[in-house]
Image: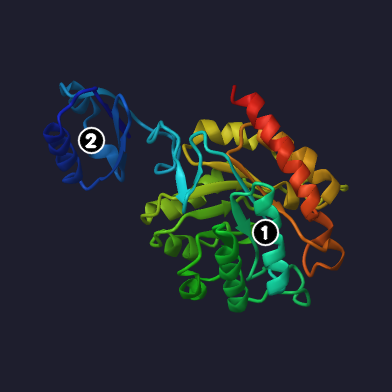
Amino acid sequence: MIVVLKNGVTQEKKDMLISWLQNLGLRIHISEGEFQTVLGLIGDTSRVDMDLVGSLDIVSSVKRVSEPFKCCNRKFHPEDMVVEIGNVKIGGGHFAMIAGPCSVETEEQIITVAKAVKAAGADMLRGGAFKPRTSPYDFPGLKAPGIELLKLARKETGLPFVTEIMSVTDLPLFEDVDMLQVGARNMQNFDLLRELGKVNKPILLKRGLANTLKELLMSAEYIMASGNEQVILCERGIRTFSDYTRNTLDLSAVPMLRELTHLPIIVDPSHATGIARLVPPMALAGAACGADGLIIEVHNDPMHALCDGAQSLRPEEYAALAEKVRGVREVITK
């Protein structure tokens, strides 16, 4: 249920209404806008008399929300969320370029790539230390030493970084990580999502390769319902009957999610296509359809990459793409 308060209501009257609703056993999500305040009522709202609440002189309107996701529902939070990672902002008109290798391999590799993507205008560095691989024989990442190398790259370049977490037990290793990524395979790892809801860090939540938008939003709900509202959604391609690309990039998800939620939405064209030459056109399309950012794999030597070299751009290719993305952004934000 949503209660919209009239403009100019005093804080005392707001507090009285909120206190009364909380005494009914409800949790209240408060969204303070420039012209109105929206109270999102979470819990068993069957005991709330809508007519009574609507008759109060401080209330503009009352309506029920049919969707199962509440915290991440745009009806609860009409204004776009802006997530801050250091001095980087994502959402609410702020566009971020995130780039780096699929996996951290060596100190030289990650620092070389970090410097290159920063020179090309990247806002954040990405790099996998823990890698969920389809085959048990593939490179699983450097794990804890990989996180330490990402910290070195941050020190060298000033770029905040995002890296994937796979298990609740690894949380202590991520205390100095700027943004934690939940990969596609863990989108419905609900125990992990609950724990990330207790962490005061931004979370990049990737859509599962066979999950609906509602399921993605319900996963975001797990994080937010546990207390952490700093969630960024990522469309990274879904599995379809297409036999020429790794996945199918569902760009229609971006404007659809924009209607449903206030959370920022970024696009990953690298995992979606799996082919380096297809990354630039799909990245441009992602920027054009209104995404709040792009996360792109870049490697200084893709031919010898230990993970996903086929979809990784070389630094010079990324620099050329970044320039084109800026051009697209200029057009669509006019």
**Do we see residue 101 in this rendering?**
no
In the figure, is residue 231 to the left or right of 61? right
- Identity of the residue drawn at 64% across and 56% down: 184
Q: Name the front one of labels 1 and 2.
A: 1
Q: Is residue 22 above or below residue 36?
A: below
Query: Where is mark 2, residue-wise?
Result: 48
In the figure, is residue 23 to the left or right of 136? left
Q: Alpha carbon of mark 1 to alpha carbon of mark 2: how far?
A: 56 Å
Q: Residue 4 is drawn in which quadrant?
A: top left
Q: Relative to the observer, which residue lies in front, 140 or 215?
A: 140
Callout 1, which amino acid? Lys
What mark, if any, has residue 14 been given in the picture?
Answer: none
Q: Residue 29 is drawn in which quadrant?
A: top left
Query: Where is mark 1, residue-wise?
Result: 115
Q: Relative to the observer, which residue lies in front, 177 or 79?
A: 177
Callout 2, which amino acid? Val
Q: Relative to the observer, which residue lies in front, 208 or 289?
A: 289
Position of residue 173 measured from the top left corner of the image (x, y, whole percent):
50, 74
* Quarter of the picture holding the C terminus: top right
Q: Residues within 10 Å of mark 2 (few under 14, many from 20)?
A: some
Position of residue 122 measured from the top left corner of the image (x, y, whole percent):
63, 49
